[in-house]
Image (cartoon, helix red, strand yellow):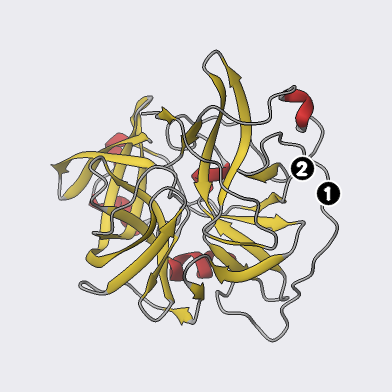
Amino acid sequence: MRVYHTAPVGNEHIPIHGSVCIYDSWENTSQGVKAEVGTTGTLVWDSGGNPFILTNKHVLFPDQFVKLNTTRKIGDAVYQCADKTQSKSFGTIFKTVSEKNPWPIKSTDDTVFDQVGDFHDSSLIKSNVGVSDDINGIGKITGVTEPVIGMKIKVNGFTSGMQSGKITKINENVAFPLPKDSTKAVVCKNIFRCDAKTAQGDSGSAILTTDNKIVGLLFAGNQAGTETIACKASAIAKAYGITFVRPANAKDTVPTPTPAPSGGGSSSIGDISVPDFVREKGFIIGVALIFGGLIIMSIGQR
């Protein structure tokens, strides 16, 4: 389900850091200018010390779980929501490691989880502006830890701001049928849940302990906004070979910003400088059904 509403677009953040509102492109419609937005998670580094911004894959690749095709690709521009004219990007999509998804719905029994690794809805952005390892309102990550039931957590998303809660479920295996193709489902292995109150547009936010250890990355929630669903930070680190804590060889630089790739830029927006609406990204999880020991849940894009 897509939700349109009036919302602030925030301020420009340079250096770029965690908990900043970002989007992939504006869209001109009869209702005004609209954009699908999400939140930056945190700064990460590869083994060579190169810094990247982490967020959800579905923030950068619209409708990846709603329909199977997308026009977005590696190298495409990403913008801060404060960039109302889409005249410059703060970075480009660098990498996304896809799980073996989606699966035919008939195959989503218990045995399918023996064929997949831990689920992680994640992508890396290569910044062309300065970067910071601070997460807005939280500070620097001090380490990585596994989710534990009852663990106290905090999260700072674009929409909901700073929220806290505790982890309520861990090591959950869930299949999400695609709303526009009921013959296929996205299989999510070893995800976890917490009772922090989050909403559309918070997708991509880092979930941390009270002492700033990262536990996971928010990617979904229920309709009431009372439950947050996340993939594990350890699964993301393993998939990309990255670290969440600044290494000794970190290469954080402040290069000159580069223009958006051809096809982007203000020409597609005309003289409009302030968006009338934003469309916040995320997932709404519906009623759960028990199917052969596997939890099958309805899913819709927020």
Tell me where residue 240 sits by quadrant.
bottom right
CA gap, disc 2 and disc 1: 7 Å
Residue 20 in picture, x, y percent from top left: 56, 54
Q: Is residue 221 in sight in this rendering?
A: yes
In the image, residue 65 sits, relative to residue 249, either above or below, namely above
Q: Secondary structure at mark 2?
A: loop
Residue at 76% over, 58% down: 129
- Seen as rendered, the residue at the extreme bottom is 248
For the residue pair 171 and 275, the one nearer the viewer reads as 275
Residue 72 in picture, x, y percent from top left: 63, 36
Residue 166 in the figure: left or right of residue 69: left
Q: Earlier in the sequence, mark 2 or mark 1?
A: 2
Residue 82 in picture, x, y percent from top left: 63, 44
Residue 178 in picture, x, y percent from top left: 36, 32
Residue at 44% over, 44% down: 201
- Seen as rendered, the residue at the extreme top is 30
Residue at 79% over, 40% down: 260
Residue 93 in the figure: left or right of residue 184: right
What type is the residue that disc 1 sits on? Thr
In the picture, the quarter occupied by the C terminus is top left
Disc 2: which residue:
88
Tell me where residue 133 sits by quadrant.
bottom right
Which disc is residue 74 wearing?
A: none
Image marks 2 and 1: residues in contact by CB distance under 8 Å = yes
Disc 1: which residue:
258
In the image, residue 118 sits, relative to residue 121, either above or below, namely below
Bin the neighbour count of mark 2 within 10 Å (Cα to Cα): few under 14, some 14-19, many 20 and up: many
In the picture, the quarter occupied by the N terminus is top left
Q: Secondary structure at mark 1?
A: loop
Q: Is residue 71 in sight in this rendering?
A: no
What type is the residue that disc 2 sits on? Lys
Bin the neighbour count of mark 1 within 10 Å (Cα to Cα): few under 14, some 14-19, many 20 and up: few
